[in-house]
Image: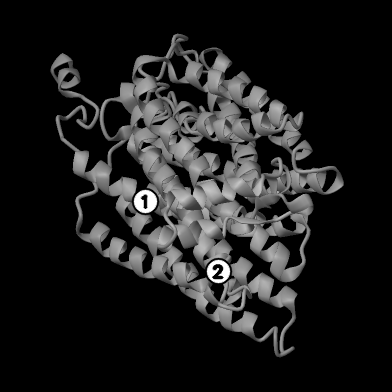
Amino acid sequence: MSTQVSKKGLFVTSEGQNVLFTFILVTTLFLLWGFCNGMIDVMDKHFQEELGLSKSQSAWVQFAHYLGYFLMSIPAGWLATKLGYKGGIIAGLLIVACGGFWFIPATKINEMVHTGAVSATTSFVAYLAGVCVIATGLTFLETIANPYTTVLGDNRFAATRINLAQSCNGIGWIFGPIIGSLYFYGKDAAGHSTGSQTLYIPYAAIAVGVLVLAVIFYFANVPDIKAEDDYHLDDPTGQGESRSIWSHPHFVLAVLAQFLYVAAQAGIFSFFINYMTSEIPAMPPSWQASLTGLSGSTGMIHDWLQGWFEPARGGLLTLSNKGASNLASLGFVCFLIGRFSGAGILKKFSPHKVLGLYGAMNVLLTFVVFLKLGWLSVVCVFLSFFFMSVMFPTIFALGIFGLGSRAKRASSFLVMAIMGGAILPKLMGYVADQYDMSRGFIVPMVCFIFVAYYGYNWSKFSGAESLGGAPMRTGH
Protein backbone atom coordinates (compact mmCIF):
# COMPACT_ATOMS: atom_id res chain seq x y z
CA MET A 1 0.00 0.00 0.00
CA SER A 2 2.74 2.46 0.87
CA THR A 3 4.46 1.69 -2.45
CA GLN A 4 1.31 2.61 -4.32
CA VAL A 5 0.83 5.83 -2.44
CA SER A 6 4.41 6.88 -3.07
CA LYS A 7 3.84 6.56 -6.79
CA LYS A 8 0.84 8.83 -6.75
CA GLY A 9 1.12 12.40 -7.92
CA LEU A 10 -0.78 15.21 -9.58
CA PHE A 11 -1.26 13.16 -12.78
CA VAL A 12 -0.16 9.70 -11.61
CA THR A 13 -2.73 7.17 -10.36
CA SER A 14 -2.31 4.76 -7.44
CA GLU A 15 -1.29 2.09 -9.97
CA GLY A 16 1.56 4.30 -11.18
CA GLN A 17 -0.12 5.13 -14.50
CA ASN A 18 0.73 8.56 -15.91
CA VAL A 19 -2.47 10.08 -17.29
CA LEU A 20 -1.22 13.57 -18.16
CA PHE A 21 -2.10 13.22 -21.87
CA THR A 22 -5.60 12.05 -20.99
CA PHE A 23 -5.98 15.04 -18.67
CA ILE A 24 -4.86 17.45 -21.43
CA LEU A 25 -7.33 15.91 -23.88
CA VAL A 26 -10.19 16.16 -21.40
CA THR A 27 -9.40 19.83 -20.73
CA THR A 28 -10.29 20.62 -24.37
CA LEU A 29 -13.89 19.85 -23.37
CA PHE A 30 -13.70 22.55 -20.71
CA LEU A 31 -12.47 24.98 -23.37
CA LEU A 32 -15.43 24.01 -25.57
CA TRP A 33 -18.20 24.63 -23.08
CA GLY A 34 -16.51 27.77 -21.78
CA PHE A 35 -16.55 29.17 -25.32
CA CYS A 36 -20.22 28.24 -25.78
CA ASN A 37 -21.17 29.76 -22.44
CA GLY A 38 -19.20 32.91 -23.24
CA MET A 39 -21.24 33.49 -26.40
CA ILE A 40 -24.50 32.81 -24.59
CA ASP A 41 -23.63 35.47 -22.02
CA VAL A 42 -23.50 38.26 -24.61
CA MET A 43 -26.54 37.13 -26.60
CA ASP A 44 -29.26 38.66 -24.40
CA LYS A 45 -28.72 42.26 -25.52
CA HIS A 46 -28.90 41.14 -29.16
CA PHE A 47 -32.42 39.79 -28.74
CA GLN A 48 -33.47 42.73 -26.56
CA GLU A 49 -32.78 45.06 -29.48
CA GLU A 50 -33.69 42.81 -32.41
CA LEU A 51 -37.01 41.65 -30.92
CA GLY A 52 -37.80 44.44 -28.45
CA LEU A 53 -37.57 42.19 -25.39
CA SER A 54 -37.25 43.30 -21.78
CA LYS A 55 -34.32 42.10 -19.65
CA SER A 56 -36.41 39.42 -17.96
CA GLN A 57 -37.78 38.24 -21.33
CA SER A 58 -34.33 38.00 -22.90
CA ALA A 59 -33.32 35.78 -19.97
CA TRP A 60 -35.21 33.00 -21.78
CA VAL A 61 -31.88 32.48 -23.55
CA GLN A 62 -30.33 31.41 -20.24
CA PHE A 63 -33.47 29.44 -19.39
CA ALA A 64 -33.22 27.42 -22.61
CA HIS A 65 -29.49 26.91 -22.08
CA TYR A 66 -29.80 25.64 -18.53
CA LEU A 67 -32.99 23.71 -19.27
CA GLY A 68 -30.85 21.43 -21.40
CA TYR A 69 -28.67 20.78 -18.37
CA PHE A 70 -31.68 20.09 -16.16
CA LEU A 71 -33.36 17.68 -18.58
CA MET A 72 -30.29 15.64 -19.44
CA SER A 73 -28.19 15.59 -16.27
CA ILE A 74 -29.78 12.40 -14.85
CA PRO A 75 -29.78 10.53 -18.20
CA ALA A 76 -26.20 11.70 -18.75
CA GLY A 77 -25.15 10.33 -15.35
CA TRP A 78 -26.86 7.02 -16.12
CA LEU A 79 -25.27 6.72 -19.57
CA ALA A 80 -21.87 7.68 -18.13
CA THR A 81 -22.17 4.68 -15.81
CA LYS A 82 -23.21 2.40 -18.68
CA LEU A 83 -20.93 3.69 -21.46
CA GLY A 84 -17.93 4.73 -19.39
CA TYR A 85 -16.10 8.00 -19.69
CA LYS A 86 -15.16 7.67 -23.37
CA GLY A 87 -18.60 6.66 -24.63
CA GLY A 88 -20.33 9.41 -22.71
CA ILE A 89 -17.93 12.06 -24.00
CA ILE A 90 -18.41 11.02 -27.64
CA ALA A 91 -22.20 11.01 -27.21
CA GLY A 92 -22.06 14.53 -25.80
CA LEU A 93 -19.90 15.82 -28.64
CA LEU A 94 -22.27 14.45 -31.27
CA ILE A 95 -25.24 16.16 -29.62
CA VAL A 96 -23.36 19.47 -29.52
CA ALA A 97 -22.68 19.11 -33.25
CA CYS A 98 -26.40 18.63 -33.94
CA GLY A 99 -27.23 21.77 -31.97
CA GLY A 100 -24.55 23.79 -33.74
CA PHE A 101 -25.77 22.82 -37.21
CA TRP A 102 -29.37 23.67 -36.21
CA PHE A 103 -28.45 27.36 -36.14
CA ILE A 104 -28.25 27.30 -39.96
CA PRO A 105 -31.99 26.58 -40.48
CA ALA A 106 -32.76 28.79 -37.46
CA THR A 107 -31.18 31.69 -39.37
CA LYS A 108 -33.30 30.86 -42.42
CA ILE A 109 -36.40 30.95 -40.22
CA ASN A 110 -35.31 34.36 -38.92
CA GLU A 111 -35.01 35.66 -42.49
CA MET A 112 -38.67 34.73 -43.03
CA VAL A 113 -39.67 37.22 -40.32
CA HIS A 114 -38.97 40.08 -42.72
CA THR A 115 -41.36 38.59 -45.29
CA GLY A 116 -44.08 38.08 -42.74
CA ALA A 117 -44.07 34.30 -43.21
CA VAL A 118 -43.26 33.66 -39.54
CA SER A 119 -43.46 35.75 -36.38
CA ALA A 120 -40.52 37.12 -34.42
CA THR A 121 -41.54 34.84 -31.56
CA THR A 122 -41.19 31.79 -33.81
CA SER A 123 -37.71 32.93 -34.83
CA PHE A 124 -36.73 33.43 -31.18
CA VAL A 125 -37.98 29.95 -30.27
CA ALA A 126 -35.99 28.45 -33.14
CA TYR A 127 -32.80 29.97 -31.77
CA LEU A 128 -33.70 28.84 -28.25
CA ALA A 129 -34.09 25.27 -29.54
CA GLY A 130 -30.52 25.31 -30.82
CA VAL A 131 -29.27 26.72 -27.53
CA CYS A 132 -31.10 23.96 -25.62
CA VAL A 133 -29.75 21.13 -27.81
CA ILE A 134 -26.17 22.35 -27.46
CA ALA A 135 -26.65 22.55 -23.69
CA THR A 136 -27.93 18.97 -23.75
CA GLY A 137 -24.65 17.82 -25.27
CA LEU A 138 -22.62 19.96 -22.90
CA THR A 139 -24.47 18.25 -20.03
CA PHE A 140 -22.91 14.94 -21.02
CA LEU A 141 -19.48 16.52 -21.17
CA GLU A 142 -19.75 18.31 -17.82
CA THR A 143 -21.28 15.31 -16.04
CA ILE A 144 -18.34 13.19 -17.15
CA ALA A 145 -15.37 15.52 -17.45
CA ASN A 146 -15.70 17.25 -14.07
CA PRO A 147 -15.54 14.09 -11.89
CA TYR A 148 -13.09 12.46 -14.30
CA THR A 149 -10.46 15.13 -13.64
CA THR A 150 -10.70 14.42 -9.90
CA VAL A 151 -9.60 10.77 -10.35
CA LEU A 152 -6.72 11.41 -12.78
CA GLY A 153 -4.09 11.27 -10.03
CA ASP A 154 -3.72 11.58 -6.27
CA ASN A 155 -6.99 12.37 -4.48
CA ARG A 156 -5.22 15.06 -2.43
CA PHE A 157 -4.95 17.16 -5.58
CA ALA A 158 -8.50 16.55 -6.85
CA ALA A 159 -9.53 20.21 -6.37
CA THR A 160 -6.28 21.38 -7.97
CA ARG A 161 -6.81 19.26 -11.09
CA ILE A 162 -10.42 20.27 -11.59
CA ASN A 163 -9.47 23.94 -11.19
CA LEU A 164 -6.63 23.55 -13.70
CA ALA A 165 -9.06 21.98 -16.16
CA GLN A 166 -11.59 24.70 -15.46
CA SER A 167 -8.87 27.24 -16.32
CA CYS A 168 -9.30 26.14 -19.93
CA ASN A 169 -12.98 26.77 -19.40
CA GLY A 170 -11.97 30.32 -18.46
CA ILE A 171 -9.96 30.68 -21.68
CA GLY A 172 -13.02 29.70 -23.69
CA TRP A 173 -15.07 32.24 -21.78
CA ILE A 174 -12.60 34.98 -22.77
CA PHE A 175 -12.92 34.33 -26.49
CA GLY A 176 -16.66 33.61 -26.47
CA PRO A 177 -17.70 37.26 -25.94
CA ILE A 178 -15.15 38.48 -28.50
CA ILE A 179 -16.54 36.17 -31.19
CA GLY A 180 -20.06 36.98 -30.03
CA SER A 181 -19.43 40.71 -30.46
CA LEU A 182 -18.26 40.16 -34.02
CA TYR A 183 -21.21 38.06 -35.14
CA PHE A 184 -24.05 39.26 -32.87
CA TYR A 185 -23.37 43.01 -32.99
CA GLY A 186 -21.77 43.51 -36.40
CA LYS A 187 -22.89 46.37 -38.65
CA ASP A 188 -22.75 46.96 -42.39
CA ALA A 189 -21.41 50.07 -44.15
CA ALA A 190 -24.74 51.84 -43.65
CA GLY A 191 -24.64 51.20 -39.89
CA HIS A 192 -27.40 48.59 -39.92
CA SER A 193 -27.12 45.53 -37.68
CA THR A 194 -26.03 42.29 -39.38
CA GLY A 195 -26.24 40.12 -36.26
CA SER A 196 -29.35 38.23 -37.35
CA GLN A 197 -27.66 37.17 -40.60
CA THR A 198 -24.31 36.12 -39.11
CA LEU A 199 -25.25 34.67 -35.70
CA TYR A 200 -25.14 31.10 -37.06
CA ILE A 201 -21.50 31.23 -38.24
CA PRO A 202 -19.68 30.54 -34.93
CA TYR A 203 -22.15 27.78 -34.07
CA ALA A 204 -21.66 26.02 -37.40
CA ALA A 205 -17.90 26.24 -36.83
CA ILE A 206 -18.33 24.69 -33.37
CA ALA A 207 -20.30 21.82 -34.91
CA VAL A 208 -17.47 21.00 -37.32
CA GLY A 209 -14.86 21.29 -34.58
CA VAL A 210 -16.60 18.93 -32.16
CA LEU A 211 -17.00 16.29 -34.86
CA VAL A 212 -13.23 16.31 -35.28
CA LEU A 213 -12.80 16.14 -31.51
CA ALA A 214 -15.17 13.15 -31.33
CA VAL A 215 -12.97 11.24 -33.76
CA ILE A 216 -9.88 12.03 -31.67
CA PHE A 217 -11.56 10.74 -28.50
CA TYR A 218 -12.65 7.58 -30.30
CA PHE A 219 -9.04 6.57 -30.96
CA ALA A 220 -7.54 8.00 -27.73
CA ASN A 221 -6.77 6.13 -24.51
CA VAL A 222 -9.39 7.20 -21.95
CA PRO A 223 -9.14 4.75 -19.01
CA ASP A 224 -12.21 4.24 -16.82
CA ILE A 225 -10.75 5.04 -13.38
CA LYS A 226 -12.87 4.51 -10.27
CA ALA A 227 -13.17 7.22 -7.63
CA GLU A 228 -12.03 6.44 -4.08
CA ASP A 229 -14.74 5.03 -1.79
CA ASP A 230 -14.03 6.77 1.53
CA TYR A 231 -17.51 6.07 2.88
CA HIS A 232 -17.48 2.35 1.87
CA LEU A 233 -20.57 2.74 -0.28
CA ASP A 234 -19.17 0.10 -2.64
CA ASP A 235 -18.37 -2.37 0.15
CA PRO A 236 -18.77 -5.88 -1.39
CA THR A 237 -20.23 -7.15 1.88
CA GLY A 238 -23.22 -4.91 1.28
CA GLN A 239 -22.73 -2.78 4.36
CA GLY A 240 -22.59 0.37 2.33
CA GLU A 241 -25.30 -0.54 -0.19
CA SER A 242 -28.15 1.01 1.79
CA ARG A 243 -26.37 4.31 2.23
CA SER A 244 -27.76 6.66 -0.40
CA ILE A 245 -25.70 9.61 -1.61
CA TRP A 246 -28.53 11.74 -0.21
CA SER A 247 -27.63 10.62 3.32
CA HIS A 248 -24.39 12.64 3.08
CA PRO A 249 -24.90 16.31 4.02
CA HIS A 250 -21.72 17.44 2.26
CA PHE A 251 -23.21 16.22 -1.04
CA VAL A 252 -26.79 17.40 -0.50
CA LEU A 253 -25.69 20.91 0.46
CA ALA A 254 -23.19 20.94 -2.42
CA VAL A 255 -26.14 20.55 -4.82
CA LEU A 256 -27.84 23.58 -3.26
CA ALA A 257 -24.58 25.55 -3.19
CA GLN A 258 -23.99 24.74 -6.86
CA PHE A 259 -27.55 25.77 -7.76
CA LEU A 260 -27.10 29.14 -6.07
CA TYR A 261 -23.57 29.71 -7.34
CA VAL A 262 -24.50 29.07 -10.98
CA ALA A 263 -27.55 31.29 -10.50
CA ALA A 264 -25.30 34.12 -9.31
CA GLN A 265 -22.73 33.52 -12.04
CA ALA A 266 -25.31 33.36 -14.83
CA GLY A 267 -26.96 36.55 -13.62
CA ILE A 268 -23.73 38.54 -13.45
CA PHE A 269 -22.46 37.21 -16.77
CA SER A 270 -25.79 37.60 -18.59
CA PHE A 271 -26.44 41.20 -17.57
CA PHE A 272 -22.83 42.37 -17.78
CA ILE A 273 -23.51 44.26 -21.02
CA ASN A 274 -26.66 45.81 -19.57
CA TYR A 275 -24.71 46.96 -16.53
CA MET A 276 -21.80 48.41 -18.50
CA THR A 277 -24.04 50.28 -20.96
CA SER A 278 -26.41 51.72 -18.35
CA GLU A 279 -24.71 51.99 -14.96
CA ILE A 280 -21.14 53.15 -15.46
CA PRO A 281 -20.51 56.93 -15.25
CA ALA A 282 -20.57 58.85 -18.53
CA MET A 283 -17.15 59.53 -20.06
CA PRO A 284 -15.71 62.63 -21.75
CA PRO A 285 -14.89 62.35 -25.48
CA SER A 286 -11.19 62.68 -24.64
CA TRP A 287 -11.30 59.10 -23.29
CA GLN A 288 -12.17 57.75 -26.73
CA ALA A 289 -9.51 59.90 -28.34
CA SER A 290 -6.90 58.63 -25.91
CA LEU A 291 -7.78 54.97 -26.47
CA THR A 292 -7.89 55.19 -30.25
CA GLY A 293 -4.72 57.30 -30.25
CA LEU A 294 -2.85 54.49 -28.52
CA SER A 295 -3.64 52.20 -31.44
CA GLY A 296 -2.57 54.66 -34.10
CA SER A 297 -4.58 56.69 -36.56
CA THR A 298 -5.04 53.76 -38.93
CA GLY A 299 -5.27 50.04 -38.70
CA MET A 300 -7.63 47.31 -37.59
CA ILE A 301 -7.14 47.92 -33.84
CA HIS A 302 -8.06 51.59 -34.27
CA ASP A 303 -11.25 50.72 -36.17
CA TRP A 304 -12.11 48.08 -33.56
CA LEU A 305 -11.83 50.57 -30.68
CA GLN A 306 -13.84 53.19 -32.57
CA GLY A 307 -16.98 51.08 -32.17
CA TRP A 308 -16.66 50.87 -28.39
CA PHE A 309 -18.41 54.18 -27.63
CA GLU A 310 -21.61 55.98 -28.52
CA PRO A 311 -22.89 59.49 -27.77
CA ALA A 312 -24.78 60.26 -24.56
CA ARG A 313 -26.47 63.41 -23.34
CA GLY A 314 -24.38 66.54 -22.72
CA GLY A 315 -21.72 65.60 -25.28
CA LEU A 316 -20.49 62.72 -23.14
CA LEU A 317 -19.95 59.10 -24.16
CA THR A 318 -21.19 55.72 -22.97
CA LEU A 319 -20.05 52.23 -23.85
CA SER A 320 -21.74 50.68 -26.87
CA ASN A 321 -23.06 47.11 -26.92
CA LYS A 322 -20.00 46.06 -28.89
CA GLY A 323 -17.64 47.81 -26.50
CA ALA A 324 -19.31 46.25 -23.46
CA SER A 325 -19.27 42.82 -25.12
CA ASN A 326 -15.54 43.10 -25.74
CA LEU A 327 -15.02 44.44 -22.23
CA ALA A 328 -16.66 41.25 -20.94
CA SER A 329 -13.50 39.49 -22.07
CA LEU A 330 -11.57 41.54 -19.51
CA GLY A 331 -13.90 40.15 -16.88
CA PHE A 332 -13.16 36.65 -18.06
CA VAL A 333 -9.43 37.41 -17.95
CA CYS A 334 -9.97 38.14 -14.24
CA PHE A 335 -11.91 34.89 -14.06
CA LEU A 336 -9.04 33.00 -15.72
CA ILE A 337 -6.43 34.58 -13.43
CA GLY A 338 -8.53 33.44 -10.51
CA ARG A 339 -8.65 29.90 -11.88
CA PHE A 340 -4.90 29.60 -12.40
CA SER A 341 -3.97 31.25 -9.13
CA GLY A 342 -6.69 29.27 -7.38
CA ALA A 343 -5.20 25.98 -8.58
CA GLY A 344 -1.95 26.90 -6.82
CA ILE A 345 -3.69 28.18 -3.69
CA LEU A 346 -5.72 24.97 -3.41
CA LYS A 347 -2.51 22.92 -3.29
CA LYS A 348 -1.49 24.77 -0.12
CA PHE A 349 -4.79 25.53 1.64
CA SER A 350 -7.92 23.53 2.37
CA PRO A 351 -10.34 23.89 -0.59
CA HIS A 352 -13.40 24.40 1.62
CA LYS A 353 -11.73 27.30 3.45
CA VAL A 354 -10.76 28.93 0.15
CA LEU A 355 -14.35 28.52 -1.06
CA GLY A 356 -15.68 30.13 2.10
CA LEU A 357 -13.31 33.10 1.80
CA TYR A 358 -14.04 33.66 -1.90
CA GLY A 359 -17.77 33.42 -1.22
CA ALA A 360 -17.55 36.03 1.55
CA MET A 361 -15.55 38.35 -0.73
CA ASN A 362 -18.24 38.17 -3.39
CA VAL A 363 -20.92 38.99 -0.85
CA LEU A 364 -19.02 42.20 -0.11
CA LEU A 365 -18.35 43.01 -3.78
CA THR A 366 -21.93 42.54 -4.99
CA PHE A 367 -23.15 44.67 -2.08
CA VAL A 368 -20.87 47.50 -3.23
CA VAL A 369 -22.30 47.16 -6.75
CA PHE A 370 -25.80 47.32 -5.26
CA LEU A 371 -24.90 50.60 -3.51
CA LYS A 372 -24.07 52.30 -6.88
CA LEU A 373 -20.74 53.83 -5.89
CA GLY A 374 -19.64 54.87 -9.38
CA TRP A 375 -16.35 53.54 -10.69
CA LEU A 376 -15.74 51.67 -7.43
CA SER A 377 -18.81 49.55 -8.16
CA VAL A 378 -17.57 48.98 -11.73
CA VAL A 379 -14.25 47.69 -10.39
CA CYS A 380 -16.13 45.41 -8.00
CA VAL A 381 -17.97 43.80 -10.92
CA PHE A 382 -14.62 42.75 -12.40
CA LEU A 383 -13.32 41.60 -9.02
CA SER A 384 -16.41 39.43 -8.62
CA PHE A 385 -15.27 37.51 -11.72
CA PHE A 386 -11.98 36.75 -9.96
CA PHE A 387 -13.60 35.49 -6.77
CA MET A 388 -16.18 33.41 -8.64
CA SER A 389 -13.41 31.57 -10.47
CA VAL A 390 -12.81 28.60 -8.16
CA MET A 391 -16.37 28.15 -6.93
CA PHE A 392 -17.90 25.73 -9.43
CA PRO A 393 -15.02 23.22 -9.59
CA THR A 394 -14.34 23.41 -5.85
CA ILE A 395 -17.98 22.85 -4.92
CA PHE A 396 -17.97 19.94 -7.36
CA ALA A 397 -14.89 18.32 -5.81
CA LEU A 398 -16.19 18.87 -2.27
CA GLY A 399 -19.60 17.46 -3.16
CA ILE A 400 -18.44 14.14 -4.65
CA PHE A 401 -15.77 13.57 -2.00
CA GLY A 402 -15.57 9.95 -0.90
CA LEU A 403 -18.57 8.64 -2.87
CA GLY A 404 -16.75 5.91 -4.83
CA SER A 405 -18.53 4.59 -7.92
CA ARG A 406 -21.56 6.67 -6.99
CA ALA A 407 -19.57 9.79 -7.83
CA LYS A 408 -20.85 9.59 -11.42
CA ARG A 409 -24.46 9.59 -10.24
CA ALA A 410 -23.72 12.33 -7.72
CA SER A 411 -22.10 14.35 -10.51
CA SER A 412 -25.32 14.22 -12.53
CA PHE A 413 -27.17 15.97 -9.70
CA LEU A 414 -24.44 18.56 -9.33
CA VAL A 415 -24.74 19.25 -13.04
CA MET A 416 -28.53 19.36 -12.73
CA ALA A 417 -28.01 22.10 -10.13
CA ILE A 418 -26.81 24.27 -13.03
CA MET A 419 -30.55 24.85 -13.55
CA GLY A 420 -30.10 27.69 -11.08
CA GLY A 421 -28.70 29.62 -14.03
CA ALA A 422 -32.07 29.36 -15.76
CA ILE A 423 -34.27 30.50 -12.90
CA LEU A 424 -32.66 33.23 -10.81
CA PRO A 425 -31.35 35.42 -13.69
CA LYS A 426 -35.01 36.00 -14.53
CA LEU A 427 -35.46 37.26 -10.97
CA MET A 428 -32.38 39.44 -11.33
CA GLY A 429 -33.75 40.77 -14.62
CA TYR A 430 -37.11 41.48 -12.97
CA VAL A 431 -35.47 43.46 -10.18
CA ALA A 432 -33.44 45.38 -12.79
CA ASP A 433 -36.60 46.14 -14.81
CA GLN A 434 -38.35 47.46 -11.68
CA TYR A 435 -35.41 49.48 -10.34
CA ASP A 436 -32.07 49.41 -12.20
CA MET A 437 -29.25 47.01 -13.04
CA SER A 438 -27.22 47.87 -9.95
CA ARG A 439 -30.10 46.93 -7.64
CA GLY A 440 -30.37 43.61 -9.47
CA PHE A 441 -27.07 42.55 -7.87
CA ILE A 442 -28.90 41.91 -4.60
CA VAL A 443 -29.90 38.52 -6.10
CA PRO A 444 -26.36 37.13 -6.58
CA MET A 445 -25.36 38.61 -3.21
CA VAL A 446 -27.87 36.36 -1.42
CA CYS A 447 -26.59 33.37 -3.40
CA PHE A 448 -22.99 34.00 -2.38
CA ILE A 449 -23.98 34.10 1.29
CA PHE A 450 -24.94 30.43 1.15
CA VAL A 451 -21.83 29.47 -0.85
CA ALA A 452 -19.66 31.03 1.86
CA TYR A 453 -21.66 29.21 4.55
CA TYR A 454 -21.18 25.85 2.81
CA GLY A 455 -17.45 26.37 2.36
CA TYR A 456 -16.76 27.36 5.96
CA ASN A 457 -18.85 24.44 7.33
CA TRP A 458 -17.87 21.67 4.89
CA SER A 459 -15.73 19.82 7.45
CA LYS A 460 -18.74 19.54 9.74
CA PHE A 461 -20.96 18.30 6.92
CA SER A 462 -18.46 15.75 5.54
CA GLY A 463 -16.71 14.67 8.74
CA ALA A 464 -13.36 15.16 7.00
CA GLU A 465 -10.68 17.77 7.59
CA SER A 466 -9.82 18.10 3.92
CA LEU A 467 -10.21 16.45 0.51
CA GLY A 468 -7.03 14.48 1.07
CA GLY A 469 -8.18 12.81 4.28
CA ALA A 470 -10.65 10.06 5.08
CA PRO A 471 -13.77 10.93 7.08
CA MET A 472 -13.15 11.60 10.76
CA ARG A 473 -16.38 9.92 11.82
CA THR A 474 -16.54 6.16 11.62
CA GLY A 475 -19.57 4.36 10.29
CA HIS A 476 -20.77 7.37 8.27
x, y (%) of residue 46? 65, 63
Of helix, strand and loop, which one carries label 2?
loop
Mark 2 or mark 1, which is nearer the start of the sequence? 1
From the viewer's perspective, tell me whether residue 238 is left or right of residue 9: right
**Which numbered circle lies on residue 186?**
2
Of the pair 157 and 370, the residue shown nearer to us = 370
Mark 1: few/some/many CA within 10 Å (<14, 14-19, 20+): many
- Label 2 packing within 10 angstroms: few (<14), some (14-19), many (20+): some
Quarter containing the N terminus: top left
Q: Which mark is residue 29?
A: 1
Q: How many labels does the image show?
A: 2
Q: Which mark is residue 157?
A: none
Mark closer to the observer (1, 2): 2
Examine the rendered structure and indicate whether residue 353 appears above or below residue 144.
above
Q: Residue at the location (64% across, 80% down)?
A: 110
SS class of the residue under badge 1? Answer: helix
User: Which residue occupies 55% across, 51% down?
Assistant: 289
The one of 281 and 164 positioned closer to us in this rendering: 281
Residue at the image point whose x is 63% and y is 84% from the top: 111
Q: Which residue is drawn at 64% across and 54% down?
A: 62
Figure quadrant of residue 436: top right
Looking at the picture, how far across and down is residue 39, in whole percent? 52, 57
Residue 428 lies, in percent from the top left, at 75, 43
